[in-house]
Amino acid sequence: MRKYIITLLLFALVFPMQGNAQKRKAVKKNNKVEVVENPLITQMLDATQKVLFIDSIVVPKSDFYSHIPLSPECGFLLQKGGVGQYTSELGDHRVEAMIHQGDTAAYLVTSDFIGGEWTSPVPVKGIGDDDANYPYVMPDGTTLYYAQKGEKSIGGYDIFVTRYNAENGSFLRPENIGMPFASEANDYLYVIDEPMQLGYFVTDRRQPEDMVCIYVFVPSTSRHVYQSEAYTPEQLRSLAAINCIADTWSDGSERRKAMERLTLARQTFDNSQVESSDNVQQLSELDTMRQKAEKMRKALAEQRKDYSIATPEAKDLMKESILKDEKELEELLLQIRQKEKEERNKTINSKL
């Protein structure tokens, strides 16, 4: 009996200790639980692009396009029903987002203005099936920026870039442009206005519901990244998140020049009155040139329509005329751009 009691005592002492040991181990294991960061985020942080952000403005998400003072020669942006649309400067090519009835995901389509009407939209080849929206085509006619969700996005929408391959009629494999333009929030639009040397980036990071922030930046012809050894991890994450645009200003001289261009862009976009009579005369001349270009564009559209249904013999006769008119239109557009550039420079110099 004595031996039995001793055995029970030993059993009672040993097993509670083992239970406590297991509990401590579980707690210790829970204490070690860490959130594993998305590898894409880590990769993008190490390659965060160095960008000069000069200004920002918070606007309603429903009409943020109306707050982007894009130069006319860069084309035209339109926002409707939660999707974006881009139309070329000549008004003859369009890339836009569409949504199937009963669906919520958008996809990109393209169409052309031929014979006085738009062709039936066809899906943009090479973009993929993931939700895609808010397209913008660079003046080169081949570089396409747009927002898309999916496995290559680190949050909601991220900004992607691709280029048109004329050989197969498709776009190349899109690439995420990375931080600071990528985030775990929704990053909607990326636009570069080459004539004004300004860029516009729209995101809802750190914003109330139904609001977005438009960041204005200075685009660069080459990509420069922050050297990790010169910054702490916290500083790099802050720059990648665009927590404070002033951190990108350096001595401020480049920002001041860019702010002058932004002020002019906004004034032109708002159709403000030009003070000098010389500038008024210049604008009148530009309007005349633009009207002429529009008439030439419409005439060319009609010629192309006739050409498409003509006989081979008639096509041979029409081809030379069409090529000649296309060259004249191209030369006129170059003159218009030069006049617009002279006008902007004149206005900037008068304010310095």
Image (cartoon, grey):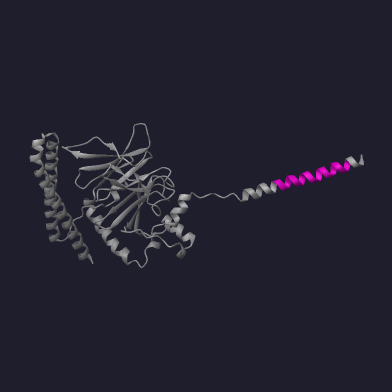
Question: Can you give x and y, in whole percent of width and height, for residue 306 in the image?
Answer: 12, 36
Quadrant where the N terminus sits is top right
47, 201: nearer the viewer? 47
Question: Can you give x and y, in whole percent of width and height, for residue 157 in the image?
Answer: 39, 45
Q: Residue at x 13, y 49 (%)?
A: 327
Say left or right for 125 vs 27: left
Total labels: the figure holds 0
Q: Residue at x 36, y 40 (%)?
A: 128
- Magenta segment range? 5-22
Q: Main secondary structure of the magenta part?
A: helix
Where 109 falls versus 247 (above or below)?
Answer: above
- Tell me where residue 284 sits by quadrant: bottom left
Quadrant where the C terminus sits is bottom left
39, 173: nearer the viewer? 173
Q: Residue at x 37, y 64 (%)?
A: 249
- Tell me where residue 171 sits by quadrant: top left
Where 262 falls versus 27 (above or below)?
Answer: below
Question: Can you give x and y, in whole percent of width and height, for residue 311 in the image?
Answer: 10, 34
Asked if the magenta segment contains residue 125, the reply would be no
- Tell me where residue 350 sits by quadrant: bottom left
Question: Can you give x and y, in whole percent of width and height, for residue 335 in the image?
Answer: 14, 55
Residue farthest along the right direction in this orientation: 1
71, 334: nearer the viewer? 334
Say left or right for 192 vs 33: left
Q: Residue at x 23, y 46 (%)?
A: 88
